[in-house]
Image: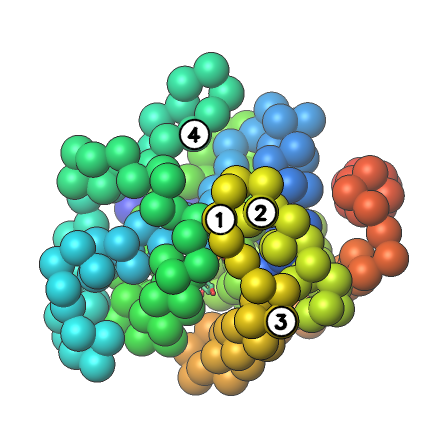
Amino acid sequence: MSQSTPDHIPVIAVDGPGGSGKGTITTRLAEHLGWHFLDSGALYRLTALAVMKHKVSLDDAAALGEIAANLDIHFETHDGTVKAVLEGVDVTPQLRLEKTGVVASRIAAIPAVRAALAERQRRFRQAPGLVADGRDMGTVIFPDAKLKIFLTASAQIRAERRYKQLKDKGESVNLTRLFKEIKARDLRDQSRNVAPLRPAEDAVIIDSTDLNIEEVFEKVLSLL
Ligand code: DC
């Protein structure tokens, strides 16, 4: 496949912390527009699963970079649901576990990991357009995105939303612990040296603390 960026293809970049509603909004937006969808967090999570599978130390930056560079992954869509496949094995059930998110956040601070995943993410830019969900979509991966949105919400409400999501999936969770983990993850994502979580200068910031998904979606559509 060509490595050049087809920069005439429009991108909508939606960045923000976990639990801000990005996933729901971007999936709906991609469906609404009939555009491709990049869940960049899933790539970091798949890398985390590969790291755990191969028992690579989180302190071995070179080995982590190697894992990210040689990642054998793909996504399969069946009846509207997306399956994540790592080395031929369906790892969808492990993808959203809190543990996977924590390791993903740790390895996401390693420059070699980010560099290895950057090109893979840019390859999702295909006609007629791409909706990209992440932390650095508007700042690093697609700085020329047509529309950049930074979706955020208070840590408390994000913890409550995550709590409900995980509970609905049958995971046993503790709200106070979740709140602390979210704060710790925010801090790690915001304070890392490479591609820290922050709004692009030309991003529109939407605070979803007091908005429901419908209201956020309407707001996004009005920006298009
Ligand atoms: O959005 P998520 O919870 O699936 O992301 C998991 C972790 O991956 C998140 O804590 C930080 C990292 N990540 C990143 O550094 N850059 C991205 N574009 C997406 C995710």
Please determine whether, in this image, residue 39 is positioned above or below residue 47: above
Q: Disc 3 designates what residue?
A: 176
Label 1 sits on what residue type? Answer: Glu
Give neighbour class at mark 2: few <14, some 14-19, many 20+ (Cα, 10 Å): few
Q: CA distance from mark 4 to mark 3?
A: 31 Å
Q: Quadrant of the C terminus?
A: top right
- Residue 72 percent location from the top left of the image: 18, 43
Q: Secondary structure at mark 1?
A: loop
In front: mark 4 or mark 2? Answer: 2
Q: Tell me which label, 4 or 2, sits earlier in the chain.
A: 4
Pointer 1 or 4: first along the chain: 4
Q: Name the residue beneath numbered marker 2.
A: 167
In the rendered structure, are the residues bearing label 1 and label 2 in contact, judged by CB atoms less than 8 Å apart?
A: yes
Q: Secondary structure at mark 3?
A: helix
Viewport quadrant of the N terminus: top left
Secondary structure of the residue carrying tag 2 is helix
Disc 4 and disc 2 in contact, CB within 8 angstroms: no
Q: Is residue 147 above or below residue 193?
A: above
Q: Quadrant of residue 219?
A: top right
Which mark is drawn over residue 68? none
Q: Which residue is mark 4?
A: 82
Q: Residues within 10 Å of mark 3 (few under 14, many from 20)?
A: few
Q: Which residue is mark 1?
A: 171
